[in-house]
Image (tube, rainbow, N blue to C red):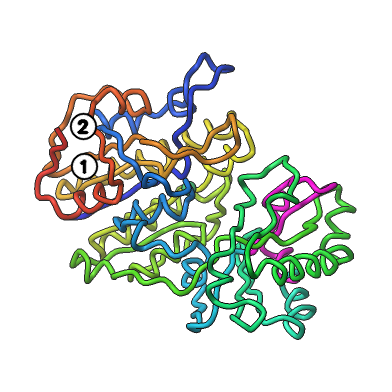
Amino acid sequence: MKYLILLGDGMADYPLPDYGDRTPIEIANTTAMDMVAQKGVLGQFCPIPEGMPPGSDIGNLSMFGYDPRNAFNGRAPIEAASQGISLAPDEVAFRCNLVSILDGVMESFTANHISTEEAAPIIDSLNEALTDKYPVRFHSGVSYRHLCIVKASETASLEALNTLACEPPHNITDQEVAPYLPQGDAAVMLHEIMTKAREVLRDHPVNKQRQAAENLPATNIWLWGQGTAPKMRSYAEKFGISGAVISAVDLVRGMGVCAGLEVVHVPGATGWVDTNYEGKVQAGLKALERHDFVFIHLEAPDETAHQGRADLKIQAIEDFDRKIVAPSLAWQENHPDSRILVAPDHFTLISTKTHAGGPVPFAICGAGVTPNNASCYSEAAAAATGILLQEGHRLVQRLIQDKTLNFQ
Ligand SMILES: [Zn+2]
């Protein structure tokens, strides 16, 4: 059996008053996802366990079949794994966003999607300026997503670093940042690092160029999502299968590394609406020739919702449907011993520009799946089925382990 997960990050949403109280999935033309629901089973599941924050870290862990309540140890260490950075036992990895804060307000948690090429010299400058004074090192990643590794010291113990309350910057778009700075025993050092970084960024040549081009400068770094090295059992141990993951996002690739999966890099995978959809699905279907399991992750529905852009989110969902789901269904025609799962990892709401928890729709079609006569793939249609898996990670466990899939 072959297993294909197609993940539209943050695709689920609430009804939009400006669009006749329909959700982006309902507005978008989603023929292929509807077909998955019609041919197979539609239902709801909760990728975010009760009481946990509705982040992509938690949601995607569930989508890989890991219980976030046991496996979750912060997002940054997973991203570090994806970059081949190993953490010493006394080191804590923080996600380091390049952000634009204007007049104390979080204008852009992505520094307006700063390019990887622009970001790299900025991260170099941070290393030059800060590594002598503080027990830190910076590693550049993709676009605005970087890492800051902090070694525990007398001023900031491992425990203190690990337990700092750090706000994800995508939760505070258009808000005053001051109340959301890291809080806890190690906060003083973190604030110092963030302040020194601001000084490095202020006159940075990359920012001069961006301002000359009337683009937002990357004014600050924002540290969050910290943790120590993760402990996850590999897919070979857990399920006895091999697999691959395709994503533009370090976090998701890192989960793949931690799960012992092959990380397939696709040129032009950007995490934005201009991503190389065709390349991703082709690479995914090719990987299924050598693996049992493939996870294709698409970030664009989430990012567009964070910007509050309903039009772009609808476009991203349509592109996901037409360019990722449709070719996968065509592939299944010739590979009947397979299952395709389509789902988001959480809600990302146009109305609030941030994530929300709660049950989201899934659809599975393929071998051994008992259909439940769904007509289309949507939040409301999934709710109407009465199928609800409270423990989201069990959905993928059952996808892989159950000979027949009947959720009734
Ligand atoms: Zn997500």
Residue 57 lies, with reference to residue 105, above or below; the image says below
According to the picture, the residue beneath numbered tag 1 turns out to be 333
Q: CA distance from mark 1 to mark 2?
A: 12 Å
Q: Residue 294 versus residue 22: which sits nearer the camera?
A: 22
Residue at 72% x, 62% y: name it.
Answer: 221
Q: Position of residue 364 (x, y in %)?
A: 24, 40
Residue at 21% x, 47% y: name it.
Answer: 339
Q: Residue 139 versus residue 115: which sits nearer the camera?
A: 139
Q: Which portion, as a residue range, is magenta?
A: 96-121
Badge 1 amino acid: Glu
Residue at 65% x, 60% y: name it.
Answer: 183
Quadrant in which residue 34 is drawn = top left
Residue 240 lies, with reference to residue 124, above or below; the image says above
According to the picture, the residue beneath numbered tag 2 turns out to be 39
Badge 2 amino acid: Lys
Find out whether residue 339 is within the magenta segment.
no
Q: Neighbour class for label 1 at 10 Å: few (<14), some, many (≥20)?
A: few
Residue at 11% x, 43% y: name it.
Answer: 368
Q: Neighbour class for label 2 at 10 Å: few (<14), some, many (≥20)?
A: many
Q: Position of residue 155 (x, y in %)?
A: 67, 79
Q: Position of residue 358 (x, y in %)?
A: 40, 36
User: Which quadrant is home to the N terminus?
Assistant: bottom left
Q: Residue furthest top?
A: 20
